[in-house]
Amino acid sequence: MIRFIEVGNQVLDDARYFSWWCTVTDRYLEFNGEQMWETWHEFTIDLHCEHLTNVHAGLSSRAEYVDLGSRLLGLYPKYRKNREGEK
């Protein structure tokens, strides 16, 4: 199971970072070498880069990343979506 983690401003005072925690592996998920992001848009860039790297290496399919992106978007809190939409 994957959990959304609100990291908050523990990294930088004005930033509100988030991460994804995998309860199966007890590790933070990593995409394109990153484990936390400030916005959904920032996250999708890293997810896309990870997808391109793995597809070219033959490690995964496009469908797997579309499914994962949809799944994570469903876990992404509405208050963050609203706040990011206001920027």
Image (cartoon, rainbow, N blue to C red):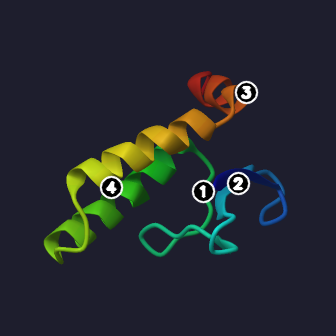
Instruction: Characterize the local packing of mark 1: few (<14), some (14-19) or many (20 or more) Cα atoms within 10 angstroms.
Output: some
Q: Amino acid at mark 3?
A: Tyr
Q: Amino acid at mark 4?
A: His
Q: Is residue 79 left or right of residue 70?
A: right
Q: Is residue 29 left or right of residue 58?
A: right
For mark 4, give the secondary structure.
Answer: helix
Query: At 57% across and 24% down in the image, what residue appears?
Result: 85
Pick whichever of labels 4 and 3 is earlier in the sequence: 4
Residue 73 in the image: state x and y as whole percent.
52, 37
Q: Amino acid at mark 2?
A: Tyr
Q: Which of 43/66 is in front?
A: 66
> For mark 2, what is the residue?
17
Pick whichever of labels 1 and 4 is earlier in the sequence: 1
> For mark 1, what is the residue?
37
CA separation, marks 2 and 1? Answer: 5 Å
Instruction: Characterize the local packing of mark 2: few (<14), some (14-19) or many (20 or more) Cα atoms within 10 angstroms.
Output: some
Asked whether the beta carbons under mark 1 and mark 3 sit within 8 Å of each other, the answer is no
CA separation, marks 3 and 2? Answer: 14 Å
For mark 2, give the secondary structure.
Answer: strand
Pick whichever of labels 2 and 4 is earlier in the sequence: 2
Query: At 49% across and 52% down in the image, what residue appears?
Result: 43
> For mark 4, what is the residue?
48
